[in-house]
Image (tube, rainbow, N blue to C red):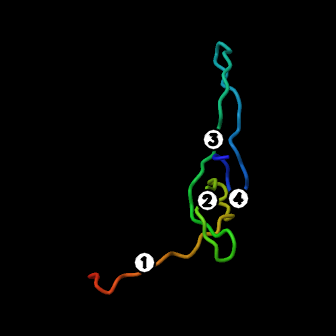
Amino acid sequence: MAQHCHFCGKTPMTGRNVSHAHNVTSRKWYLNLQSVRALIAPGTTRRVRACSRCLRSGKVVKPAVRLRATSPTSPV
C-alpha cells in the first residue's frame, strides 16, 4: 500500500461530500506523508514515508549527517 505511514500504519480515511442539495459523493482524506531517512534498526538507515505527526512526536529517529569524502585533487 503506497499511502501509509511506516511507523504508525495510518492510512487515508474515506467519507462523503454532501452538498446543499444533498448530492452525496465519496472522497478521501490523505495523510501528510514525508519521505525521510530514518534509522530502522541499529546501524540500518532507510528512506521511508512517515506522517507529520510521527515526525513531530519523535517516533522517527534520524541518522547522523553524512559527510562527503573529497578527492585529493579537488580544490577546496
| Distance in Å between CA atoms under marks 4 and 1 | 29 Å
Marker disc for residue 19:
none
Q: Is residue 61 above or below residue 19?
A: below
Front: mark 3 or 2: 2
Marker disc for residue 48:
2
| Distance in Å between CA atoms under marks 1 and 3 | 36 Å
Q: Is residue 65 above or below residue 73?
A: above
Residue drawn at (63%, 60%) of the image: 55
The residue tagged 4 is 7
The residue tagged 1 is 68
Point out the image quarter for the C terminus.
Answer: bottom left
Front: mark 2 or 4: 2
Q: Is residue 9 above or below residue 59?
A: above
- Give the farthest residue toward the bottom: 72
Contact, mark 2 vs mark 4 (Cβ under 8 Å)? yes
Q: Secondary structure at mark 3?
A: loop
> Which amino acid, by three-letter code, is at mark 3?
Tyr
Question: Going by the image, does 65 lie left or right of 23?
Answer: left
| Distance in Å between CA atoms under marks 4 and 3 | 16 Å
Earlier-in-chain disc, 3 versus 2:
3
Q: Position of residue 2 (x, y in %)?
A: 63, 47
